[in-house]
Amino acid sequence: MVHDFLNGNIEASRKFQLDSLPLISALFSEVNPIPVKAALNLMGYKFGIPRLPLTEITDKAKLILENEMKKLNII
């Protein structure tokens, strides 16, 4: 997105930003770093679960996060 913007391809940069909004929303669906750790785990990194007092991501939020990551070919 930044690369496109700095190279004058404003429309591609804007499209990528708008296409990313559902993923950004999913990453902020629960207290940070819960969704971020879940996303990294979905990508195959072994980040485990958050330490107490935080909990694991809810099943519903994880499903939404996973679907948005798939839409953008992240996983």
Image: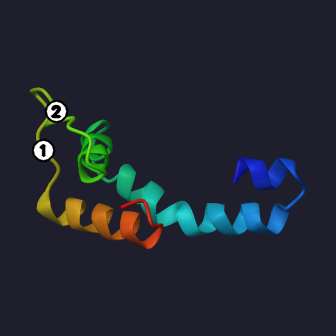
- In space, the residues marked 1 and 2 are separated at their CA atoms by 6 Å
What residue is shown at x 30% (from left), y 36% (from top)? 33
Residue lying farthest to the top in this orientation? 52
Secondary structure state at the residue bearing disc 2? loop
Residue lying farthest to the right in this orientation? 8
What residue is shown at x 9% (from left), y 27% (from top)? 52
- Please give the residue where the numbered disc 1 appears in the rendered image: 56
Q: Percent x, y for residue 11? A: 80, 68
Mark 1 vs 2, N-terminal side = 2
| Left/right of residue 52 with respect to residue 72 in the rendered view | left
- Please give the residue where the numbered disc 2 appears in the rendered image: 50
Q: Quadrant of the N terminus?
A: bottom right
Q: Percent x, y for residue 36? A: 33, 43
The vertical placement of 44 against 26, above or below, is above
Q: Say few, some or many: other residues with alpha carbon within 10 Å of mark 1 (under 14 / 14 to 19 / 20 or more).
A: some
What residue is shown at x 42% (from left), y 59% (from top)? 74
Confirm or deny contact between disc 1 and disc 2 (CB under 8 A): yes
| Left/right of residue 57 with respect to residue 68 in the rendered view | left
Q: Quadrant of the C terminus?
A: bottom left
